[in-house]
Image: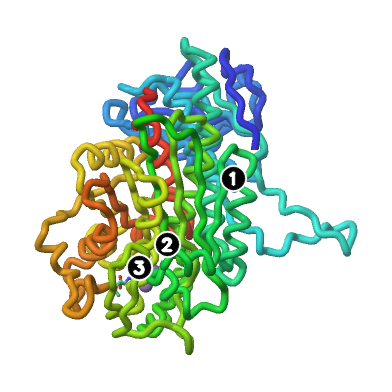
Amino acid sequence: MKVEVKLGDVRENNSEVLVLFSYEDLDFMQGVAKMAKDARFKGEKNETKLVHPPSAFKCKHILLTGLGKREKATSYDVYVAAGRAAQEACSEEFKTLAFNLPETVGTKIENTARQVCEGAMTALYKFDQFKSKKKDKESEDEFKEDEKEIETIEILCPFEADGERMKREVEEARIISECVHVTRDLVNYPSNLKRPPMLADRIKQHVSRHGIRFGVLDENAMKRKGMGSLLAVASGSGSPPRLVTLEYGKKREGKPPLCLVGKGIKFDSGGISLKPSKGMDEMKGDMAGAAAVAGAMMAISQLKIPLHVVGVMPLTENMPDGNAQRPGDIVKAMNGKSIEVLNTDAEGRMVLADAVAYAEETYKPDYLVDIATLTGAVVVCLGKHATGLLSNDDALKKQVIEAGEKVHERCWELPFWKEYRDMVKSKVADVKNIGSESGEGGTITAGAFVASFLNEKTKWAHLDIAGTSFSEGGKPFGHVGATGVGVRLFVELARSMSGENV
Ligand code: BES
Ligand code: MN
Ligand code: ZN
């Protein structure tokens, strides 16, 4: 998909569809207001109406798109409306689409351009690579591409604007959206086709062009390191585990890196503590944390954000098998801590235990953020509209929350008091992998377990994306499947840590 920025008179634009945004005040340019009125367009949020353009316009169709009340509209409203309009244009099988940028109270026009581009591109995502393509009518034996795709997006600016800055913003939006697509693809991909070695190779292919140093530990290397916790989870799987590391940027004197650690369970059956079968297919997406880290690393490197960033991804799966770990087992993580396994379905925190300990020992980061589809409890607590957040550092917490607000990947903090941290102490080992049989405070105790494998001085934040990484459709774009949550947030976080202003 090509994205272009054009300044000048929108009436001259000759795309198949021209999107004209409008608020409820219907304050349109000359000639359009009557047309909107005749079409009974009200300018309500996400309302769209396809109409024939007045004669002064060179485009084939106009798609009127509502933004609601002018005073209330946020940049996120523009993002969503652009997405809706793009989907509408795509379903009408148009190929070229132009957006006339709206004025938004309190948002710079260059930023609005970015919202429109990101909204349209992320809304146009499709996961259809496993569908057989439609047969070409003329030649029976040849398969032709299913051609329902937008090829060009044009961003038109009718106002005074810094053209160069706008082009830069739009190009960044394009890069970020493509990385979100990579993350979604990785999560949506079926588990049978993403065994850890294959997944590691796929990540390697994705990052190789972008100046990222790729590293991988295989099972033997994990054994040498003493990663008994990760290996215990992996022991029930028919395919061997991998631990992938991605490093971008330089080590700087006195500036240790930001470390991102993502849970990469490519299928979570629960293991011997088997899950019920309903909805179990969704557990192919239990590597959404690792996928978000991979996508974010790709974006951060392409945007050349001046920061040393490291991604760590433990990749394996959780299966019941003759070699699988059992409830009651005691295993040892690489930092020497012993773990009483009381429920094999609490596997995410066990792979993270070794991954965060490895990240800390290897990279000595100032900041470590882990991201994981960790607990069903976070979905009970926050539903699907917020990522659960735990942290031991106020400044880091604030940066994470603000980054999330900026890209509408909102995080909500839960308490991290000693009482909760005490809940993962075991009678027979150093820690146990569940806080209690009843599951009370489950999201917090899961995080407390992970934190117990880190030095207290490491500034840590923990993102539980079990509710936000996968969507059953509906708002805002109606996609079923992976959301790609975390990518846009990490890009903003890296930017704010680098001191680069946005
Ligand atoms: N991967 C699951 C958490 C999950 C649940 C992700 C729903 C996405 C949607 C995790 O490994 C898990 O099974 N957690 C258990 C923990 C429990 C056994 C303490 C859970 O939440 O039930
Ligand atoms: Mn589990
Ligand atoms: Zn899991």
Residue 377 horizontal/vertical position (percent): 25, 66
Mark 1 vs mark 3: which is more N-terminal? 1
Q: Which of the 4 image quadrants contains residue 257? A: top left
Dot 2 falls on a residue whose secondary structure is strand
Instruction: Check disc 2: other Cα within 10 Å, few if <14, some if 14-19, many if 20+.
Output: few
Mark 2 vs mark 1: which is more N-terminal? 1
Q: Is residue 69 left or right of residue 168?
A: left
Please give the count of numbered marks on the rendered protein.
3
Residue at the spot x=40%, y=59% of the render? 355
Residue at the spot x=19%, y=75% of the render? 426
Instruction: Check disc 1: other Cα within 10 Å, few if <14, some if 14-19, many if 20+.
Output: many
Q: Is residue 277 above or below residue 400?
A: below
Work out which residue is located at the far front of the displayed protein and give it.
224
Task: Name the residue that disc number 1 marks.
Answer: 207
Q: Which of the 4 image quadrants contains residue 367? A: top left
The nearer-to-camera label among 3 and 2 is 3
Distance between the Cα atoms at labels 1 and 3? 29 Å
Residue at the spot x=64%, y=40% of the render? 209
Circle on res. 333: 3
Q: Is residue 339 left or right of residue 308?
A: left
Residue 55 horizontal/vertical position (percent): 62, 20
Which amino acid type is shown beneath numbered disc 2?
A: Glu
Which amino acid type is shown beneath numbered disc 1?
A: Val
Mark 3 vs mark 2: which is more N-terminal? 3
Q: Which of the 4 image quadrants contains residue 492? A: top left
Quadrant (top left/top right/bottom left/bottom right) for the C terminus = top left
User: Ligand 1 shows up in which quadrant of the image?
Assistant: bottom left
Residue 64 appears in the figure: no
Task: Name the residue that disc number 2 marks.
Answer: 472
